[in-house]
Amino acid sequence: MISTEGIEYTISYTVAAYSSTDAPAHRFQAITEDGQIASELYVDMNTLIIENIETAPQYRREGIATELFAAAEKRLPEVLHARPEHRTEEGNGWAEAVGGDTEDHQDEDEVEDPWN
C-alpha cells in the first residue's frame, strides 16, 4: 500500500495477543520499508470487534489505519467497531470516517435487571 504521503507500507496479518494478558486476536500491521510498525489493528477472534487501532504519531493522517480496516474487512467475514461508549473521542471520529457496522450487544454487567 502507498499512503497519502507517498510512503510505501506492507500490510501483514497474523494471530497475536494485543497484550500479554489478552487472548489471541487477528492482527493487521502496516510496516515501513525499514521494518518499523507504523500502525496496528487488532480484531477479537470471537466477536470480530475491533480491540484496538493505533498509528504511531509520525505516520498519522496518511490513511494507514483506514487501509488496515479495509484489509481486515477483506480477510474476515465481518469487522465491527466497538460501541461509542467503549471508544476514545479520536476512535469515534475514525469509526465514523471509515464507516462499517458497530457491535450491538450489551455486556452482562450492562443489562438491566427486569426485577429491579
Image (tube, rainbow, N blue to C red):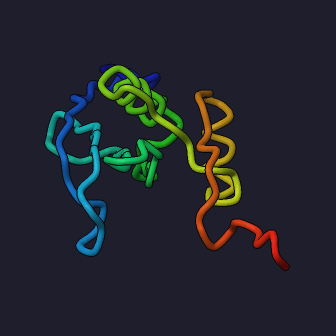
Q: Residue at x 52, y 38 (%)?
A: 80
**Does residue 87 lie above or below 98 as drawn?**
below
Q: Among all residues in the image, which is located at the extreme front?
A: 115
Is the residue 83 above or below the residue 8 in the image?
below
The quarter of the displayed image where residue 39 is located:
top left
| Left or right placement of residue 81 versus residue 12 in this view | right
Q: Measuring 62% from the left and 27% from the top, which residue is drawn there?
A: 99
Image side of residue 80 versus residue 43, left or right: right
- Image quarter in which the N terminus is found: top left
Q: Residue at x 43, y 51 (%)?
A: 54
Pick the quarter of the image with the C terminus.
bottom right
Q: Quadrant of residue 72?
A: top left
Residue 10 picture location, percent across and down: 21, 29
Give 29 or 80, whichever is nearer the viewer: 80
Residue that lies at the very extreme toward the right in this rendered image: 116
Residue pictured at 61% horizontal, 39% vertical: 102
Residue 65 in the image: state x and y as whole percent.
Answer: 45, 36
Query: Number of callouts in the render?
Result: 0
What x and y, as percent, mark residue 92?
67, 47
